[in-house]
Image: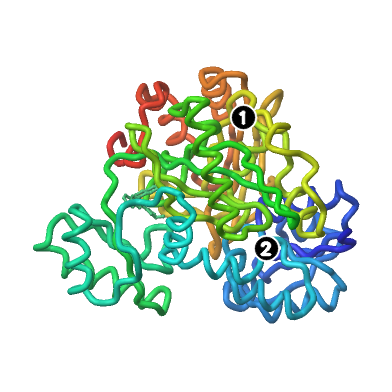
Amino acid sequence: MIRKLLVANRGEIAVRIIRACREMGIETVAVYSEADREALHAKLADEAVCIGPASLSDSYLSMERIISATIVTGAQAIHPGFGFLSENAKFASLCEKCNIIFIGPKAEIIERLGNKQLARETMQKAGVPVIPGSDRAVFDYRDGLHEAEKIGYPIMIKAALGGGGKGMRLSGSKEDFEKNFRIAQAEAKQCFGDDAMYLEHYIKGPRHVEFQILADSYGNVVHLGERDCSIQRKHQKLIEEAPCCALSPKQRMKMGQTAVRAAKAAGYINAGTIEFLLEPSGAFYFMEMNTRIQVEHPITEWITGIDLIKEQIRIAAGEKLTFSQNDIRISGHAIEMRINAEKPEEEFRPCPGTITGLHLPGGKGIRIDSAIYSGYRVPPFYDSMIAKISVWAKTREEAIRKARSALGEVIIEGVDTNVDYQYGILEEPDYQNGNVDINYIENHF
Ligand code: MV4
């Protein structure tokens, strides 16, 4: 088993990982930037190493500094959390070369799935439904125009190395295709240093439904049900819930089996997420696979009782899964609300500053994932998410009531937050009735 692990992240996810390690008897090393001297993750870990100034490229994104900290402290493994280096194939490969266990899939698998066009091809070969689109990468708008004619408009133009909406553009007809292709491709070149594009038919008004999977090194792959992440704004998720209220048990089984097939086709090991677009008709399509632990993992933990971080560590240490698909029971309903330090009334501008007063909710079925404390200064350099409040109850209706009750208790003084905005969503009839799709926020607020 792993004796000592370095956490290559900050904020609530770093704290989450440190807690899991402590419970497992694994020593922890935190890394922190100069802006994070007073950060909770640096205080909670057994050891903490300052790896550089506030700027990301000189600290949390510096492979050399993080590998050095690992070697100097004698840690045997690195957990990358999410964001930062978590889906960086070069970093995973560097870990492998340095004999450090990277808590995640093999570098080669991260690389293959990071290329969304290659992932599409892999899935299509394995019989996983993909969105009707191009069969290989498109580099020239003229080839694109020809492909688009076959696929049918509207067309979504996407960067092969994209994700999260970067290098993505909608084309409504052949008249505006060239312009949109050029814009998307220029953005792809700029953001990813790669101009490979692919095309898909545009799916109108779907839900975003993602399946959590776990795969060990012995060929065992299970799914832990799904999360509905449709409630998002500009590709930032706001509220996630599990299970998805639009799925029947039969449909859940079908999509779950498809997710397992997708993971097997990719040769996947560790925790991963298969993203689908789900149409109102029940048709669903593979969109991409995420090779990291996700922000919203707590709601899957709520409905399955499985600790995903501990499973990630055990899998990386070469252990077998101790349960099979039949042992996994989806129970009740969970909702996660992301709390950000921001000003909703000023276009959600981040609002860093000192937390001068703090009360967070608690009680049965309420979980807080956070790294803030009274007196903590939220630095301006990093993500504005300061807490995740998640709740569990037997039914969706009860979970929504609990979520509203929990939010109603929150007191965060010193920085503005989106708590009232979140409360507004939970009060809204279409949300309460489960009438949501990926355009919900645009259409309602
Ligand atoms: C799409 C789509 C509709 N049709 N692809 C957004 C981010 C990237 N991961 C893929 N995205 C989308 N791809 C086709 N063919 C709509 C989106 C999309 C979206 C997807 C999931 C959650 C929120 C979204 C918000 C806007 C657009």
Find disc 1 in the rendering and name its residue: 391
Q: Secondary structure at mark 1?
A: strand
Mark 1 is on which residue type?
Val
The residue located at (55%, 70%) in the rendering is 111
Residue at mark 1: C-beta within 8 A of ligand 1: no
The residue located at (70%, 46%) in the rendering is 308
Q: Secondary structure at mark 2?
A: loop
Q: Residues within 10 Å of mark 1 (few under 14, many from 20)?
A: many
Mark 2 is on which residue type?
Pro
The residue located at (68%, 51%) in the rendering is 215
**What mark, if any, has residue 200 been given in the picture?**
none
User: Outermost residue toward the left?
Assistant: 175
Residue 107, image quadrant: bottom right
Q: Nearer the viewer, mark 2 or mark 1?
A: 2
Where residue 60 sits: x, y (%)? 64, 70
Where residue 78 sits: x, y (%)? 75, 66
> Quarter of the image containing the C terminus?
top left
Residue 29, image quadrant: bottom right
Q: Is residue 218 left or right of residue 157?
A: right
Find disc 2 in the rendering and name its residue: 80
Q: Is residue 244 above or below residue 319?
A: above
Where residue 302 sits: x, y (%)? 66, 33
Q: Is residue 15 above or below residue 204?
A: below
Task: State the CA–CA distance, disc 2 to disc 1.
Answer: 26 Å
